[in-house]
Image (cartoon, rainbow, N blue to C red):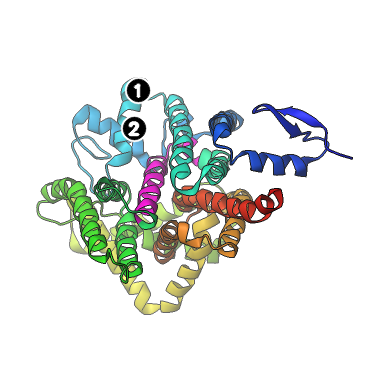
Amino acid sequence: MKDTPTVTLLGQMPGVDFMRNPMSWLKMTLIQMNDAKLFGRFAAIIVALALIVRLGVLLCFWPTWIWHTGHVQDSWNDLAINWVTHGTFGFNPHEPTIARGPVFPLLEIPLYLLFGNNYAAWSVTLLLFDTGTCLLLILLARQVWGNRAALLAGLFYGVNLPIIYYTATIQQFTSVLPLVVVWFYLFSRWDLDSPKKWIPWTLGLVSGVLMLNKTVYLPVTLTSLVAIIWLKRKEPQFKSICRQAAIVLCTAVVAVAPWTYRNYVVTEGAVVPVQSYFWQLVWQKYLLSDLDATEGVSRPDDRTLNYFLSRRAELFERVDGTSGVKLTGPKKELYEERVFRDQVLEWFRSKPTQFVGNVISNMWGFWARAENLKKTLLMLSMQSVFLGAAVFGLGLAIRYGQLFKIRFGLLLVLTLWAEHSLVLGWGRFSLDTVPVLAVVFGTGIDAWMKQKIGENQG
């Protein structure tokens, strides 16, 4: 018996009744996704779905959001507020900080000017901003990976629950994601095509802004530049690739340099490219391992933070009691980083096997770890669906010879994973990789469709 033609959501095209035959409906939808004439309609549906899911998550968790109490994760709001009201980039008025980069607070400044301390409005606006990132992903991915891959990537991103949840909590990575989309697009255009002259310049600028957002993107950029020079070493345009790589690097340095100079001024002579926040994270990982060993992973909310704060107070009470150092602002932050560094190195020398255990723990923690078992299991339940889909897409991309199309996205993922594995692995850190994983998923499914269903249709 043949499927009964029906009218689809996309217009007056013959389709398949979803309720009667969902697999045939899915097959038909995937085929239609490659139709350039229907691209706009599919994109509109996916973006609308992304917006609906975001607002739905916001409402479902409405009573639980921390910003109801006036608090924001990592005090990012204080950086924006003090920048506007006191002209100081710092957590306290008239006391600059070198512990954070400037990009996310710049995004928050308009929110403060428009909404004041109404953080619910901040959250809604950031969710709308992230919906725009979904659209950006679809539009740029189409130009490199094709219609169907772009739409599937947009769908993957649009319903990614960890992205939505953490965006609603007002966190830094929301400003990183569109930059990752543009970076991946530009690097892939450079790798796969004969690039336009503007691409290296734009790629350098985007790389620099990414570094100003998170310093973890400095190794990402350097690793990727080394990789493309190595991969293109036998091609006729190798000298041109080297010149373009130099443009990317120099442009990124120029983009970061003003902030580095600012840090040099406020520290009165220290060279801090973007931020000083590093050794404290490594120190926190050692504490986290100790806490897991003594109290287990099933502990109340806020216990992890309170443990960090109490151990921090003990450390500085002991150190300051002997040195008598009384500093403020950036000098204090530099001093504290040295204290954390010395403590970490002491632990490393006395128990090196624990460092190895920390790295192994960080490798899985980067994808799913949260402050306690309950939150870790929740994160794992959400991540398993999307990571499973990404791995499935990667397998298909390898199977059908499309790995070269996504290789620099995968390099970004591996570099971030390696960096956090050496320092501290939390599930929310992995969310920077979602745009890449979305394209990996879309590229794999698209390759499978072209090889299997496309041949059968012919």
Q: Residues within 10 Å of mark 1 (few under 14, many from 20)?
A: few
Tag 2 near tag 1, CB within 8 Å: no
Q: Residue at x 32, y 73 (%)?
A: 346
Quadrant of the snapshot with the N terminus? top right
Residue 334 falls within the magenta-colored stretch: no
Q: Which residue is mark 1?
A: 116
Q: Is residue 146 left or right of residue 346?
A: right
Give above or below for 132 relative to 455.
above
Q: Residue at x 26, y 49 (%)?
A: 208
Residue 415 position in % (x across, y down):
40, 62
- Looking at the rendered structure, the kind of residue marked 2 is Glu
Residue 182 falls within the magenta-colored stretch: yes
Q: Secondary structure at mark 2?
A: helix
Q: Can see residue 319?
A: no
Q: Quadrant of residue 63?
A: top right
Q: Nearer the viewer, mark 2 or mark 1?
A: 2
Q: Which mark is residue 108?
A: 2
Residue 430 position in % (x across, y down):
47, 53
Q: Can see residue 245?
A: yes
Q: Residue furthest right?
A: 1
Residue stretch rendered in magenta on the structure: 166-190
Q: Residue at x 41, y 78 (%)?
A: 352
Q: Secondary structure at mark 1?
A: loop
* First of labels 2, 1 by sequence position: 2
Q: Residue furthest front?
A: 458
Q: Residues within 10 Å of mark 2 (few under 14, many from 20)?
A: many
Give above or below for 328 relative to 226.
above
Magenta span: predominant SS is helix
Residue 127 position in % (x across, y down):
47, 32
Q: Residue at x 40, y 50 (%)?
A: 184
Residue 139 position in % (x across, y down):
45, 38
Real-space CA distance between mark 2 and mark 1, rounded to the nearest whole angstrom = 10 Å
